[in-house]
Amino acid sequence: MTYRPKFHLTPPQGRLNDPNGLTLIGDELHVFYQHDPSFPRTPKRTGWGHAVTRLDDGRFYHLPDALYPDFPYDANGCYSGSAVVHEGHMRLFYTGNLKVDGERVTSQNIVDVEDVQGPLGGVYHRRADNPAIEGFPEGFTPDFRDPHVTQAPDGSWRMVIGARRENNTGAVVVYTSQDLDTWELAGPLEFVGLDYNTASAYMWECPNLLRMEDRATGEVLDVLVFCPQFPDSDECGYVVGRLDGLTFEVVTGFTPLDYGHEFYAPQLVSLGAGALMLGWMGLPARDDTPTFAAEGWVHQLTLPRELSLIDATLHTTLRLPRDQDEMLVSRQALDATPQTLELVDVEGNVGATVAWAPQTDGDGGQATVRGTLSVTVDGLMRWAECGAGELVCTADGSALELTAGGGEVAFSSAVFAPNGNEWASFQLA
């Protein structure tokens, strides 16, 4: 018996958090992640772990850790970032964390990677002229991190960085480059029509900026994913719109990317007209889990998820492993009839309850079924509204994931069966 899932990436030991450097090479998916291998026995020393899977398989294979905090500009942590493969050359971009007299010194750094598909999972060379970006712009604070690099429509490159202003409001700051080596400050994104509550968060973490083609309209739109932090909560969501220079005209306001109990700091990489995404099934300061005491590791990543843009909203499809017999999968049709499913282990213990409460609206003789889907774990309920359609539920070790309404909503939750029991079924209650 074990809490460790078969198809969700977990650290070999220690603490895992944000996915980093998500890279597709053919059907091979490389996933880097924040890894503190000696957690909690020694002071925090976060670097980058590295694992790989094939999209048609779903099992992750660990490679040696890629980055350790051992340079003068990252002595207190190699924080989150991204990867780019261009003209056969792979680069990693990450935030270096350094503490001097109790003050944070932040920098954005570049790593050249050789032979990432080799038996050692790559050879990593930090640039001799690092930091590529030192410090932070005027009007901002040292909370300036998580570079995500993508190519702009004109062929240039843009880096978005999560930031905190001196007045304690969140922002996304843009840098641009022609060669991926030299970066110039463009400035913060300015939003037209963004929800005020989200804009008032004191810090925006882990931004991702991609262009995606709307499957319903054919229009190419900009999608910005980010994690606003409030004094008493952390969120994760996206906005959709049209980016012109630094002006982001919002078409779809801030929308949660996942409604479950454990989801944060996702990373996206383009995949066809949409994107592939993994998220951290954890939250800041939530490290007290049964997995550490029992097995010496903390936290996991979601399954790879395909994101599609439909009518300017993101829809989620879970990429299920080839050997689905080794993971619990349930498919139910949501319609005008209420339903309740219980996730039950081999001893009959209920780990989670999934409930569908439909509402039917008539419009000119046509009935449209929408409703509320809720997931309850340890007495704590999370819910979202969505349309009728297929409900897909998966359970794998301590990882519960589901989508509903044709992928209109997704939920991620960590669920721990007593004594690491295996899950037996999703049964109708």
Image (cartoon, helix red, strand yellow):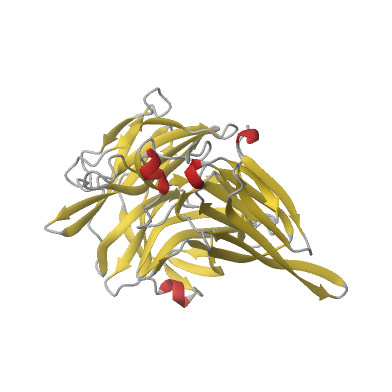
Which of 194/183 is in front?
194
Residue 346 in sight from this viewpoint: yes
Which of 291/308 is in front?
291
Where does residue 231 sit, x and y in percent of width and height? 35, 71
Q: Is residue 147 above or below residue 58?
A: below
Residue 87 in sight from this viewpoint: no
For this orientation, the residue located farthest to the left is 101
Identify the residue at image location x=50%, y=36%.
Answer: 1
Q: Is residue 265 above or below residue 50?
A: below
Q: Is residue 241 above or below residue 330?
A: below
Where does residue 368 sit, x and y in percent of width and height? 79, 68
Relative to 359, 3 lies left or right: left
Where does residue 221 sit, x and y in percent of width and height? 57, 59
Which of 237/173 is in front?
237
Where does residue 197 sit, x and y in percent of width and height? 45, 76
For this orientation, the residue located farthest to the front is 347
Relative to 325, 9 lies left or right: left
Which of 356/309 is in front?
356
For this orientation, the residue located farthest to the right is 365
